[in-house]
Image: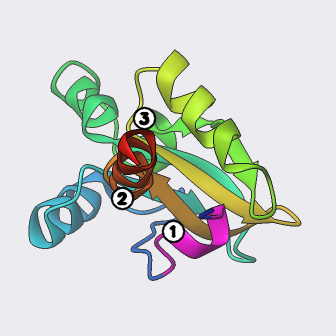
């Protein structure tokens, strides 16, 4: 069975709370991603900035990531059960969950990262 550690994306593009919103949007566009983990200087999770969060910039006079990011996002520990990720993503509207080890960001699991696990489960049912 797959584990969080085995399926999570480890090579992440991150921003800090003081990052200019324009720079964050450029990163989303350049890398074709829909959200950015926000970390402090020590690598601790400070929040997450999604496209949905950035839509608020149209209405608000925000300048930096910390003004729009989702603070204290839902996270899972790297050694948590994979079913916990499924449960969180099924009961919330967000597309990704940040993975931590002792509070420091070590990865991210998105809905698309779970598709091989879903396929494996479906194939098991027909065997």
Decide which of tag 3 and tag 2 comes sooner along the chain. 3
Residue 25: x percent and y percent? 20, 55
Q: Going by the picture, which residue comes out furthest to the bottom? A: 11
Residue 6: x percent and y percent? 58, 74
Report the mark closest to the observer, 3 or 2.
2
- Which residue occupies 81% across, 62% down? 79
Q: Given contact means CB atoms under 8 Å apart, are the residues at marks 2 and 1 in contact?
A: yes
Stretch of the chain drawn in magenta: 3-10
Q: Is residue 84 above or below residue 13?
A: above
Question: In the shown orientation, is residue 86 left or right of residue 95?
Answer: right
Badge 2 crowding class, 10 Å Cα cut-off, few under 14, some 14 to 19, many 20 or more, is few
- Which residue occupies 25% across, 39% down? 51
Specify whether residue 6 is painted magenta.
yes
Mark 1 — residue?
7
Q: At numbered mark 2, what does the secondary structure look like: helix, strand or loop?
A: helix
Measure how far apart labels 2 and 1 are at the Cα level: 9 Å
Q: Nearer the viewer, residue 35 or 93?
A: 93
Q: Nearer the viewer, residue 117 or 91?
A: 117
Q: Going by the picture, which residue comes out furthest to the right? A: 102
Number of numbered discs visible in the structure rendering: 3
Disc on res. 68: 3
């Amino acid at each position: 069975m797959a584990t969080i550690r085995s399926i999570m994306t480890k090579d992440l593009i991150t921003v800090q709370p003081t990052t200019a919103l324009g720079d964050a949007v450029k990163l989303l566009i350049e890398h074709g991603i829909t959200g950015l983990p926000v970390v402090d200087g020590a690598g601790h999770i400070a929040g997450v900035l999604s496209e949905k969060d950035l839509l608020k910039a149209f209405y608000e006079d925000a300048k930096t990531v910390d003004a729009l990011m989702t603070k204290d996002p839902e996270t899972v520990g790297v050694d948590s059960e994979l079913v916990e990720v499924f449960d969180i993503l099924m009961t919330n509207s967000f597309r990704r969950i940040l993975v931590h080890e002792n509070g420091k960001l070590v990865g991210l699991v998105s809905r698309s990262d779970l598709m091989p696990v879903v396929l494996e489960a479906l194939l098991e049912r027909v065997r």
